Image (cartoon, rainbow, N blue to C red):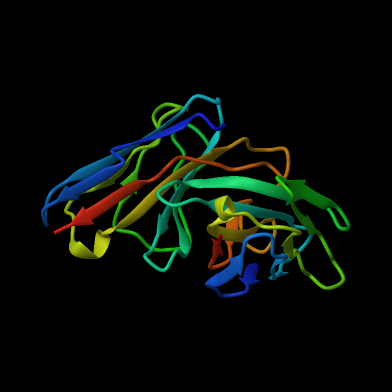
Amino acid sequence: EADIYQTPRYLVIGTGKKITLECSQTMGHDKMYWYQQDPGMELHLIHYSYGVNSTEKGDLSSESTVSRIRTEHFPLTLESARPSHTSQYLCASSEYGTGPGNTIYFGEGSWLTVV
Amino acid sequence: GNSVTQMEGPVTLSEEAFLTINCTYTATGYPSLFWYVQYPGEGLQLLLKATKADDKGSNKGFEATYRKETTSFHLEKGSVQVSDSAVYFCALSSFYGGSQGNLIFGKGTKLSVKP
């Protein structure tokens, strides 16, 4: 079982509010990810990080931002939420550097609804 | 670029039926291949993986064989149970083709098993 935690699990907020989704892992993994899952189930990589002070944009353009100040922590922030940001956000982590076969471990997800 | 195509659902089966979910891929180099499962309201869990051609991944009665000649990684289970109802995602990981070792997912196949 993976040790990766996301909070909050469920959140309903108003348009224009700032929100930070928290993600922490206790496995000492260097690489971390944020995926956005749309209602049709499809998963899109929006951000990833190779380690402390590293952040990269994923395949899907996103208005969110991320930071990686500590190895175990990879929060995602929306400065001004809009209804189009309503989605499930999945955080994940993996080891890095030993090949593409590394298992990526996922948190349970954060369901965000913007009204 | 790298991509994954899996059969669209939803798939509805009776308990103890045989399951096949087709997955094919396009990739530069030699990717690793994965099947992830997402139960309702949860994040993704690794079901099985294979890191080189002809490898067979297996777990919980599910199997998939990495077929380089047909670029396929089809998921099979001989006798499904109601508890197997979930969404199944095929994915690849490669350091080539612009993927940076990140997971590239198929669109997911929803499986419902009726008693």
Query: Would residue B71 be found to the left or right of residue A57 on screen?
Result: right
What is the count of numbered marks? Answer: 0
Residue A42 horizontal/vertical position (percent): 47, 65
Query: In the image, is residue B105 above or below residue A102?
Result: below
Whether residue B1 is visible to the viewer of this picture, yes or no, is: no
Give the quarter of the figure containing the N terminus of chain B.
bottom right
Which residue is at 39% across, 45% downward? A109
Query: In the image, is residue B84 above or below residue B8?
Result: above
Residue A45 horizontal/vertical position (percent): 47, 56
Whether residue B93 is visible to the viewer of this picture, yes or no, is: yes
Residue A51 horizontal/vertical position (percent): 51, 34
Quick one: A7 or A30, which is closer to the camera? Answer: A7
Which residue is at 16% across, 46% downward? A18
Give the quarter of the figure containing the C terminus of chain B.
bottom right
Which residue is at 73% across, 43% downward? A99
Query: Would residue A57 be found to the left or right of residue B77 on screen?
Result: left
Q: Quadrant of residue B71?
A: bottom right
Query: In the image, is residue B101 above or below residue A51?
Result: below
Residue B14 horizontal/vertical position (percent): 61, 66
Query: Would residue B4 be found to the left or right of residue A31 on screen?
Result: right
Quick one: A68 or B43, which is closer to the camera? Answer: B43
